Each structure stands twice: as C-alpha cells, then as structure tokens.
Amino acid sequence: MNSFISKPPDLPTVSSAATNDQSVASANRSPVVDVDNVYKSFGAQHVLNGVSLTVHPGETRAVLGRSGTGKSVLLRLIVGLQEPDSGSVRIFGQDIAGLSLDRLAPIRKKMGFLFQHAALYDSLTVGENVGFPLNHHRADMSKSERDERVSQVLSEVGMEKQSDKMPAELSGGMQKRIGLARALVMDPELLLLDEPTAGLDPIGSAEINELVLKLQKEHHIAFIVVTHDIHSARTIADRLTLLDKGCVVMDGSFEELKSSDNEFVREFLKHS
Ligand SMILES: Nc1ncnc2c1ncn2[C@@H]1O[C@H](COP(=O)(O)OP(=O)(O)OP(=O)(O)O)[C@@H](O)[C@H]1O
Ligand SMILES: [Mg+2]
C-alpha cells in the first residue's frame, strides 16, 4: 500500500513557512524545480521573458503577479504541458524539454496539480474523482487499497464524509479541497496549486492555507502556489516570486518584498 507518510526519514518535518533554518538546509539540496531563463511566446505575444526560479525539497514558493502576466503558463511549462521557446525546466534534476510522454510519466507521477479552473468530473462522485489518478496509474493496487487511499486523502482534507456526494452538491471551498485531495492521492513530492483560494471567502481561504501548512509540516511536500492573495502568500510561502510582463520583478521573502523600494513592488503590495 502506498503510504501517505512515505517521505525519506532524513527530511525535516517542520513547517516550511517562515522557517529560515529549513530554507538554508533546503538550499543545500538539489532543487525539485529549477526553471532557468525561460522564454515563451504565443505568436507575437511574448508571455515569459527570461523567468528563473527554484524550489527546494519541502519549500513553498508563491508566484504573484497581475492577471495575464504568465503565471499559469509558467505552471504548464513546469508540468510539461507546454514547452519553453528557450531556457530550461528541470524537475527532480531532469530537463523535461522534449521528453516523450513515456519518459515524462514517472516525473509527473511525483507531481500533483490543482489547476486554476480544474473542474471535478461532474458525473463522478467525490470519491471517484479523487480515485481517478489511482485508477489510471496504480494498476498494482487492489480496489480495496485504492478505496482506502481515497478515504485517507479525503480525511486529510477534512472531507471524509463527502465521498458519495456529487461535485454539484458541494460549495466552491469544498470543491477546492476535493481538487486538492485528488492532487494528493498519488503521494506527490511537488504540488502545484493555481489560485487555490480564488473565489473563496476569508474563512474558506484560511482553511486552505491551514491545509497547505499541515501538508508542509506532515508530508514535507514542495509547493508552487500561484495566487493573487498576498495574505495567503505571506502565510504559506518561504519565498515569493513577483512577475510583471513575464519578468521576475522580485524574488525573496515577504519581508524583503515589503521593504523593497521597487516601484512596481510597492504598487502591487498597496493594491493587494
Ligand atoms: N495556449 C495559448 N495560446 C495563446 N495564448 C496563450 C495561451 N496560453 C496563455 N496564453 C496567453 O498568455 C498570457 C498569460 O496567460 P496566463 O494564463 O499565464 O496568465 P495568468 O498570469 O495566469 O493570469 P490570471 O491571473 O488571470 O490567471 C495571456 O495573455 C494568455 O492569453
Ligand atoms: Mg492564471
């Protein structure tokens, strides 16, 4: 059975938010994600113009920026759904450019994603939605093992009672949790969350933030979280990347962002 708590024992299990010691320790290990000087255009539209960022094991990076600045495109490059025009994307140490689906599959298995508009499958129950990746990728597990795993992740996100419900019966916040459970079911080392708190009320957002903090602490997952929500970024992230017009304007801690005298950073924070 694929245990949820299956991370290497030498990794620390402290919360990664605002824990400088861990950030220093993380910096000594090879990055889980290493995006180096990536460019991406669609026709004449230059979306990413030399973006670099790294994420180390157990680290959480928030990616912030105005609408249309290329945040979701960046995540799609990291997942390998799109390819950069130039620059490299290394995931778990491997350059994923041009990898065949067969070669990409084992890397993807270690990643979970919650896409920005990731709808759950309307015609499947919550439990079936969450179990979907297992049905496709874990033929080695028996049905009862898969069911047990689904119950385990549903309980991780506090939704254990909702397994037989249809997605339409759930609130937006509950649907996000189910999406998160589906992203977790394969026991990922890296989770990519695109706007996990968008559309939620402050309590729903706080619940998602707490869930991310819990996952950091208990499972030592590395995260990239795209968000417009500066409060959420501050709460969950070790480091923040602020993008503007496809360029990195600032890369640092929330405190560094706050004390920056860059005009764009100051404007962005003022309106966040
Ligand atoms: N497949 C595509 N073909 C053409 N243009 C695209 C494609 N994907 C993204 N774009 C364009 O790239 C730009 C950046 O899109 P992206 O979705 O990354 O923005 P974003 O920063 O995530 O915005 P938001 O905060 O609104 O989600 C947009 O102008 C978008 O129209
Ligand atoms: Mg987006």
Image: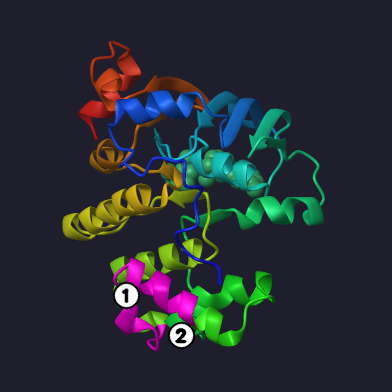
Q: Is residue 158 visible?
A: yes
Circle 2 residue? 125
Per the image, label 2 sits on a secondary structure element best described as loop
Dot 2 surroundings within 10 Å: few (below 14), some, or many (20 or more)?
some
Whether label 1 lies within 8 Å of ligand 2 gets the answer no
Asked if labels 2 and 1 touch by Cβ distance under 8 angstroms, the answer is no
Q: Position of residue 53 (x, y in %)?
A: 53, 27
Dot 1 surroundings within 10 Å: few (below 14), some, or many (20 or more)?
some
Per the image, label 1 sits on a secondary structure element best described as loop
- The kind of residue tagged 2 is Thr
Circle 1 residue? 159
Quadrant holding the C terminus: top left
* Mark 1 and mark 2: Cα distance apart in space: 13 Å
Of circles 1 and 2, the one toward us is 1
Q: Which residue corresponds to the image point at 36% horizontal and 30% vertical from the top-left?
A: 22
Q: Is residue 164 left or right of residue 84?
A: left
Corner quadrant of residue 21: top left
- The kind of residue tagged 1 is Met
Corner quadrant of residue 196: bottom left
| Number of marks | 2
Corner quadrant of residue 267: top left
Quadrant holding the N terminus: bottom right
Which secondary structure class fits the magenta region best?
Answer: helix
Q: Closest to the observer: 177 or 5?
A: 5
Q: Position of residue 165 (x, y in %)?
A: 37, 87
Q: Is residue 134 left or right of residue 159?
A: right
Magenta highlight on residue 162? yes
Q: Which residues are magenta?
A: 148-166
